[in-house]
Each structure stands twice: as structure tokens, then as C-alpha cells.
Image (cartoon, rainbow, N blue to C red):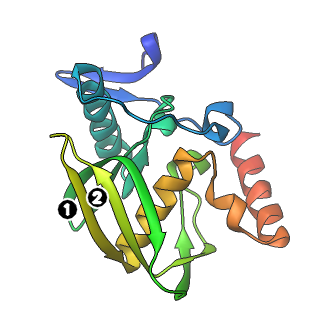
Amino acid sequence: MSTRNGYYKQEKDMAIKQVRKIGDPVLRETSSEVKKIDRWLLDLVKDMLDTLQEEGGVGLAAPQIGTTKRVIIVRIEGKVQTYINPEIEAMGSGMNEDDEGCLSIYSIQGFQVKRYSKIKVRAGDLRGRSVEFIAQDLFARVIQHEVDHLNGKLFIDHLDADSKMELLKKIDEITS
């Protein structure tokens, strides 16, 4: 496996990037706005899609592959969407608590995170158009999780002290 140029693995027409793990400073940076749709951005999204396909999961944010730009991809019910410069707004105060995992936290699961049940999303698409929609339940959870990455946050930041300690112990077991 080659890590040349930051690529985890290259196959015919695929560019799978190495997913950055907790402790990598890039995951704690605030991502900058995407100013234009260009070849560089399209290549970034392709790398993200290839990486998500290889790694599994339901979403990926650009910082997870080392690029601090406001781009996320979300896979729900087999369909993958790209959102550029996403902004979210809670729709009401309803929240639910559910299990979350993260490719950047070694895909460890079993930790409950409280998120808004319903959000309004405003973003751009790859054609430069503005999109606005309401997301609920799992779709809302995934978008909130990925937008957190753009703001330098990880799901561990939403956990209580005991759960954080338990997760950190699991991470230590994996990395030791």
C-alpha cells in the first residue's frame, strides 16, 4: 500500500485517501469556504467518494482526508449527495440520542450522541446551484456529524466525561 502524495491506495481511476484519525490536528481546524466549482474541487469530491466507497460509512467531510474545505458527502439509502458550504439550522427543539461512529475515530461505535431530530440545510451543489431542504432523523444526524467536522469538532466532544474516558480507552487499545 502506497502513501505517496497522501494517497492510501490507488487503483484504476480510483484515488482512495487515507482517513485522518483522532489526534491529527487537521481534524480540529475550522474549514474554509469553497469559493468556486473548479477541477480541483471536482477531484476532491471524487477522492472523497472513492474513499467513502472503500471505507464504508454514511458520510465523509473533506478534513477527514486532510483538506480543510467546507465539503461533505452523505450516503443515505444508497444515494450519495455532495454539499458545499453547508449551513444547518435546528427546526424546533426536538432531539434524539442515538449511536454514532466515525471513520476518524477508528469506526468505534456504541456511544450515544444527542442531535437535533430535524434541521434545515442550505448548501451548494456541484453545479453551483443553491439547495435548501429539511432533513430528519438519520439524514439530519449524518449531516450534523459531517458539519461538525467542518467546524473542527468530533462526536467525542458531545459525550459526557465518563463516555469520553471509555472511548479514549478504546482508542488507546486500538493504537497501542
74 or 108, which lies in front? 74
Check the image and report above or below for 158 versus 125: below
176 relative to 9, above or below:
below
Q: Position of residue 2 (x, y in %)?
A: 43, 15
Report x, y in % for residue 94.
52, 89
User: Which quarter of the picture shows residue 137?
Assistant: bottom left
Callout 1: 10 Å neighbours few (<14), some, many (20+)? few
* Residue 119 appears in view: yes
| Quarter of the view holding residue 30 | top right
Give the labeled residue for mark 1. 78
Amino acid on which the number 1 mark rests in the picture: Gly
Kindly check if marks 1 and 2 are in contact, taking CB atoms under 8 A apart as contact: yes
Q: Given the image, on which type of amino acid does mark 2 rest? A: Arg
Horizontal side, residue 12 vs residue 152: left or right: left
Is residue 19 at least partly visible in the picture? no
What is the number of the mark on residue 75? Answer: 2
Quadrant that contains the N terminus: top left
Q: Residues within 10 Å of mark 2 (few under 14, many from 20)?
A: some
